[in-house]
Image (spheres, rainbow, N blue to C red):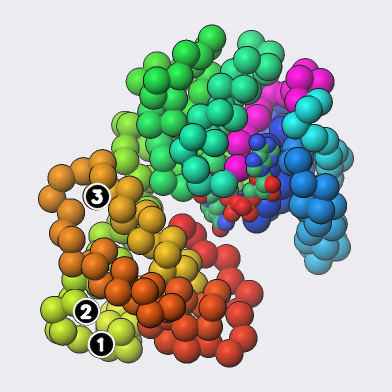
Amino acid sequence: MEHFQRLPGSIVIIGAGTQGRRLAYMWSSRGGSVSLVDFQEQQLHDSVQYVQRLRDIHADREKSWGEIGISYPNSLKTTLKDAWLVMECVPEILLLKQKVIAQLDDLAPEGTIIASNSSSYGISEVIEGLQLKNKKRVLSAHCSIEIMGHKDTNPSLITLLLEQSKAHGFSPFHVRKSSIGYIYNRIWAAIKRETLLALSEGVCTPQEIDAIFKDVLKTPKGPCEQMDVVGLDVVLDIENHYAESRSGIPTEPREYLRNMIQYGRLGVKNGQGFYKYTDAPNQMPRI
Ligand SMILES: NC(=O)c1ccc[n+]([C@@H]2O[C@H](COP(=O)([O-])OP(=O)(O)OC[C@H]3O[C@@H](n4cnc5c(N)ncnc54)[C@H](O)[C@@H]3O)[C@@H](O)[C@H]2O)c1
């Protein structure tokens, strides 16, 4: 395992849901302590169990696990007092993200990096209109993989986070300019959009699209299978966000999705999307 310099202080994760607990596992894998903050006791409890299960599974790997602490939002100031990094992992609702980032800016010590894990809102959109004390330490760190600043983010913090993310087992990339959507997500959005457009024109069936995609690119899943895993309502929300933020996005893919959703086809989560499902598979979609 490569040598790295562990930073003094802890990492705080706001939101102990699907993503927060995954990040807690990774960020505690090299001895640093992680505090999970959520107002739902059950989520905190489940997160600790989730991290422990993964640690048990990977017990053979050489790791020096850090402590996992849990706390509630009402003691946030105390939880943050020695944090070098705080990441918000609350649901993908812009107003909620803005509220949490403003709160963190208010309560976190001056040197704490504040990161948003949003899948679809870049940090420039999140902080727009907010009166922050120190916006230079605020950035996006989607899944600790795509690190993106806004125009005033301190570049040295981006470098630091890229280094630390890599040392904790992520494969991080720097999104060099403010972007509506992250690098991978933009490419994936284009694939989804063109897939839906071709379907709406009657050019091919979902089965044919998936088969040709997998055959040419040697991927385990095709676009329709992958959209089913993410959830067609989520796919529509993301595409709506692109359409609101950019010109030239065709309307047909969204109409096609709305029509499917109207007939109760949401994907794997309710057993019916492009395909029918009997068991919910254990998947980790990238949305
Ligand atoms: N789920 C994924 O696979 C995935 C992948 C990449 C990125 N993301 C992004 O990560 C973020 C979180 O997604 P998720 O799927 O983990 O959501 P989730 O709904 O599973 O969990 C969110 C958690 O935040 C908590 N919460 C809400 N408001 C809070 C507050 N003010 N203070 C503390 N806790 C609060 C909720 O109680 C909940 O436990 C979103 O921005 C999402 O787009 C998710």
Q: Secondary structure at mark 2?
A: helix
Q: Secondary structure at mark 3?
A: helix
**Residue under label 3:** 243
Residue 85 lies in the magenta stretch: yes
The answer to whether marks 2 and 1 mark residues whose Cβ atoms lie closer than 8 Å is yes
Residue 37 in percent (x, y) is at: 75, 37
- In the image, residue 137 sits, relative to residue 166, either above or below, namely above
Q: CA distance from mark 3 to mark 2?
A: 19 Å
Residue 174 in percent (x, y) is at: 42, 37
**Residue under label 1:** 205
User: Which residue lies most toward the front here?
Assistant: 262
| Left or right: 24 as drawn, with respect to 213 | right
- In the image, residue 238 sits, relative to residue 208, either above or below, namely above
Q: CA distance from mark 2 to mark 1?
A: 6 Å
Callout 2 amino acid? Leu
Callout 1 amino acid? Thr
- Residue drawn at point x = 74 percent, y = 41 percent: 38
Number of marks = 3
**Residue under label 2:** 199
Span shown in magenta: 76-90
Residue 225 in percent (x, y) is at: 42, 78
Residue 40 in percent (x, y) is at: 77, 46
In the foreground, 176 or 120: 120
| Left or right: 257 as drawn, with respect to 21 | left
